[in-house]
Image: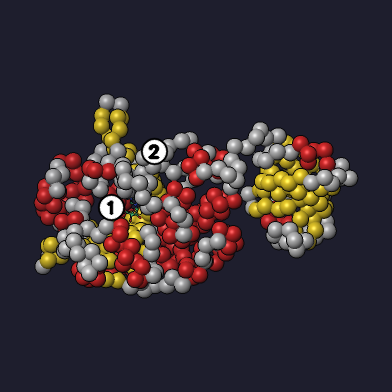
Amino acid sequence: MTLKKIHEVLDGCCPDQKVQVRGWIYRKREGKDLIFLVLRDSTGIIQCTVKKTSPAWSEAQKLTIESSLSLEGTAREDKRAPGGYEISAENINIIGLAETFPIGKDKSEEFIRDMRHLWLRSRKMNLVMKVRDQVFESAREYFKSQYYTEVSPPMFISAAVEGGSTLFGLKYFDQQLYLTQSSQLYLEILMYSLEKVYCIAPSFRAEKSRTIRHLTEYWHMEGEWPFADMTDLMKFEEDLMTHICQSIGEKCEKEFAELGADINKLKTVKAPFPRITYKEAIERLKPKNPTLDWGTDLGYEDEKVLAEEFGKPFFVYDYPTEIKAFYCKTYSDHPEIAMSVDMMVPRIGEISTGGAREDNKDILIQRMKAQGLNPEDYEWYLDLRRYGTVPHVGFGMGVERLIVWMLDLDNIIDAISFPRTTRRFYP
Ligand code: ATP
Ligand code: MG
């Protein structure tokens, strides 16, 4: 008798052999002479049958949904069984008999969200979390292959990065601190030591709007590096995105198939991506949205319309300076235009923002003042321009936005195990 994971049995490791599997009861159907159990472990689900004549019968009768157990039986190929294999049980050892499981077929979406701690056991969440794991791994793989060093910036910070409106303040002993909105400024510090740096870390935004693409706590994949310009930046971002999509396309076939998501969308992602300027974007959108003029930020609806036209990832670059953060570098002959670029994808719109950072100390101070920021709060940031300033670029991509797009999920809350939104923070 050998202990097997369910996927091994489904892959045909041991037809007509005795196996032991361990897991939880996913479904149960009881007939007069036969009980059907669907057992789940981390790797999949498998149908098990228990005959009335089997020594496992009385234990099988007691089993409830989500009870944990160890089951021994004979693996058999059976075309009728979901997955093509089933186990006819000969022995069942109940480990933890479950009380009546609160999540059933008829429960509302709202109820399921309240039961997140239990819903994470569902096939859907199990598969999404596995794809997410692979996204992290593939991203790291690409950064590493390009000689980037992974760093760990702080989450408690003393000054805003992305402006006050989405900043979470908190009492830190007897001082006022904030939760970081982006690790960019810290990556800029570290870049002077390590050159190419990146991190995948939480960012916090006090977003009041309830949309399918906003969380209050999300995972932010950010990179920063010196001696580089906008062309280098877009090339890196599209190569990174291509690598992640190709790698998921290769490694997550099963997960996509079970989730009913289209993996070909990822397989066709290849650099270079189309790129248009903000000015061209406005011209394209104007007939559909006459209120859109040069200087207005693109809204979610505008981004979606653009993205529908492209049908794949693309870039919009060269945004108006006035709608960009103080650190965005501007063109010396066109100070009204900032070297900023967003990557967009269908249905979700923006998934990353990047750009060249202002490397001139005096211009940086002017920009801070123009945005009502106090340069004294950013002394350390100004030091980076005082001592060996260098042209540099960086970007930040929302990991959950990437996953929502890849898997075509209805809402960003399903791209993360424990979503934080205005209303949700339990457990
Ligand atoms: P938006 O305009 O969509 O709110 P943003 O431009 O404010 O986004 P950035 O500051 O550019 O966001 O952040 C970089 C990336 O982080 C975004 O492109 C997006 O992928 C992700 N991101 C930003 N805010 C959130 C959020 N609240 N929830 C999830 N991901 C986010
Ligand atoms: Mg942005």
Pointer 1: residues within 10 angstroms few (<14), some, or many (20+)? many
Q: Amino acid at mark 2?
A: Arg
Calculate the distance from the C-alpha at mark 2 to the C-alpha at mark 1: 34 Å
Left or right: 354 in relation to 71? left
Left or right: 229 in relation to 147? left
Disc number at residue 416? Answer: none
Left or right: 166 in relation to 111? left
Q: Amino acid at mark 1?
A: Glu
Residue depicted at x 56% and y 52%: 124
Which quadrant holds residue 191?
bottom left
Quadrant of ligand 2: it is bottom left
SS at circle 1: helix
Residue depicted at x 20% and y 55%: 324
Which quadrant holds residue 98?
top right
Q: Is residue 232 above or below residue 65?
A: below
The nearer-to-camera label among 2 and 1 is 2
Residue depicted at x 30% and y 26%: 173
Q: Is residue 117 visible?
A: yes
Outermost residue toward the right? 53
The residue under label 2 is 423
Image spot of residue 155 (x, y percent): 35, 41
Left or right: 290 in relation to 169? left
The residue under label 1 is 188
